Image: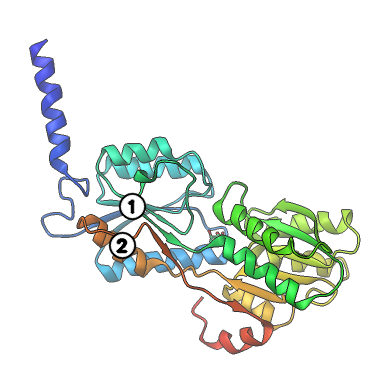
């Protein structure tokens, strides 16, 4: 009996001794930080650019990156985070595929003294002690900007179909909300159909094909990302209509393929969402591991593009 208690107590002490930053070699002897990064997947051009940015920035910052791709599945992300806890990384960063359902695994990280940084997408939890900071865009504002352009550039009734991002994901929830907030001031603009295309080109194409069959006289497509907008363009062309002319198309992201379609007149307006978060993420990680204070929220700065602005910006576009 006595022996058992002694064992239990000493393992608690051992855990405590690991301290902030987790592992035994936390930002260890040689100062190298190990980061476990649980990425959403490879669903879009935005994601590809984001992954590249994180990998390059880690290398440049001398951070040892353990990277996993969850293929848009929450269970895979949870497994990855758990394995980073077991491996005693110094810091965990992840872009949560959906907003809810993270408390248990993040509590495990917290108990192991491993700080967590949310990047790109936020979680919906009452316990804000589960993460140090959230680095990413203001998705509600992106939705606001998309709708404001529509208000400013159209008169009369507009039938809008909406291609939503992944169900339950922060950018899908907030881009919808932001758009609806602003169109509320124009009762003649109406969302007549809204469905998820899972942020993929094929998803956008399929949903748009169904919309074109079921909904006559669509005026506007509002797609939560470029890839779904590009899929919708294929469906619109196949239906014998001219994208960007017969049907107005508004998207979010401003990745290369989206900007090319915008410059070519097939998309009408793009709200920028910046995927190049790597450098800021590595800076935050270094501070968090060193026990320095970081702001609870770091918002990415971004703009919008018209067709003319896309033509001007394209030659220097990195992604
Ligand atoms: O807009 C979309 C991607 O979370 C901001 O995820 C990101 C979104 C981005 O699949 O293209």
Extreme residue in the top direction = 1
Q: Residues within 10 Å of mark 2 (few under 14, many from 20)?
A: many
Closer to us: 298 or 121 = 298
Q: Residues within 10 Å of mark 1 (few under 14, many from 20)?
A: some
Q: Quadrant of residue 83?
A: top left
Extreme residue in the right direction = 216
Q: Kindly identify which residue carries mark 1.
A: 132
Label 1 vs label 2: CA separation?
9 Å
Q: Are marks 1 and 2 in contact (CB under 8 Å)?
A: yes
Q: Position of residue 237 (x, y in %)?
A: 82, 70
* Vertical placement of residue 76 versus 151, above or below: above
Q: Which residue is rendered at x = 66% and y = 87% of the image?
A: 308
Q: Which residue is rendered at x = 66% and y = 56% of the image?
A: 176
Q: Position of residue 193 (x, y in %)?
A: 79, 54
Q: Which residue is rendered at x = 14% and y = 29% of the image?
A: 11
Closer to us: 150 or 86 = 150
Q: Quadrant of residue 34?
A: bottom left
């Amino acid at each position: 009996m006595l022996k058992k208690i002694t064992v239990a107590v000493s393992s608690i002490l051992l855990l405590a001794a690991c301290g902030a930053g987790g592992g035994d070699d936390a930002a260890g002897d040689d100062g190298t930080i190990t980061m476990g990064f649980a990425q959403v997947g490879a669903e879009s051009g935005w994601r590809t650019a984001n992954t590249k940015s994180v990998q390059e920035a880690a290398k440049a910052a001398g951070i040892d990156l353990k990277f996993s791709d969850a293929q848009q599945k929450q269970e895979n992300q949870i497994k990855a985070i758990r394995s980073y806890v077991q491996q005693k990384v110094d810091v965990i960063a992840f872009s949560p595929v959906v907003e809810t359902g993270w408390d248990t695994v993040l509590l495990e990280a917290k108990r192991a003294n491993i700080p967590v940084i949310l990047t790109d997408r936020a979680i919906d939890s009452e316990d804000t002690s589960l993460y140090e900071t959230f680095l990413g865009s203001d998705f509600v504002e992106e939705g606001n900007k998309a709708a404001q352009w529509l208000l400013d550039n159209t008169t009369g009734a507009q039938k809008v179909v909406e291609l939503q991002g992944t169900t339950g994901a922060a950018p899908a929830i907030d881009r919808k909300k932001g758009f609806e907030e602003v169109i509320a001031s124009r009762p003649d603009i109406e969302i007549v159909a809204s469905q998820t295309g899972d942020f993929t080109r094929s998803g956008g194409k399929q949903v748009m094909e169904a919309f074109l069959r079921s909904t006559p006289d669509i005026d506007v497509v509002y797609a939560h990302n470029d890839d779904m907008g590009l899929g919708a363009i294929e469906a619109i062309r196949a239906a014998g209509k001219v994208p960007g002319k017969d049907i107005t198309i508004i998207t979010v992201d401003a990745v290369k393929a989206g900007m090319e379609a915008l410059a070519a007149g097939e998309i009408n307006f793009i709200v920028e969402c910046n995927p190049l978060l790597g450098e800021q993420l590595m800076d935050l990680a270094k501070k968090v591991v060193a026990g320095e204070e970081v702001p609870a929220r770091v918002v990415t700065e971004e703009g919008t593009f018209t067709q003319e602005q896309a033509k001007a910006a394209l030659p220097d576009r990195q992604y």
